[in-house]
Image (cartoon, helix red, strand yellow):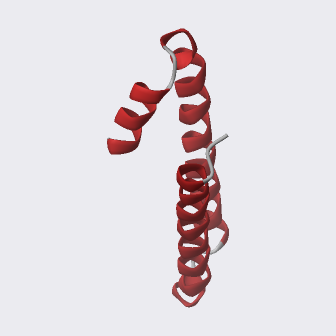
Amino acid sequence: MAIIQIMQESVPEAERGRVFGVQTSLCQLFALIKDLALICLPEPRTYSLLIVGSYTATTLGALCYMHHLFFPK
């Protein structure tokens, strides 16, 4: 919710539909990738791979956000 509010405040009104459409598409793409990974690795012994993948994706997202905050164009 906080990210959406920040985006609404910083994105010009004329471009909001495009930006939020891309954001929604990316969220659905990553949810699909997550579901496919879970289907491909259903065994409990492979959960560690899913956990490492989730942690890596979350960390990369946080790093990208920090880069955006501290090095704006």
Q: Residue at (60%, 73%) from the top-left corner?
A: 56
* Residue shown at 58% from the left, 64% from the top: 63
Quarter-of-image position of residue 26: top right
- Tell me how many marks there are: 0
Q: Nearer the viewer, residue 44 or 62?
A: 62
Look at 53% across and 51% down and name the residue there. Answer: 69
Observer-nearest of 51 and 62: 62
Return the residue found at the far bottom: 45
**Place of residue 28 in the rendered image (x, y in percent of width and height, measured from the top left):** 56, 41
Q: Position of residue 7 (x, y in %)?
A: 45, 32
Could you tell me which quadrant the C terminus lies in?
Answer: top right
Pick whichever, 27 or 62, lies toward us.
62
Query: Which image quarter: residue 70?
Result: bottom right
Is residue 23 found left or right of 33 in the rendered image?
A: left
Residue 46 vertical placement versus 28 (above, below) = below
Q: Quadrant of residue 37?
A: bottom right
Q: Is residue 61 above or below residue 50?
A: above
Q: Is residue 30 above or below residue 21?
A: below
Q: Residue at x 54, y 9 (%)?
A: 14
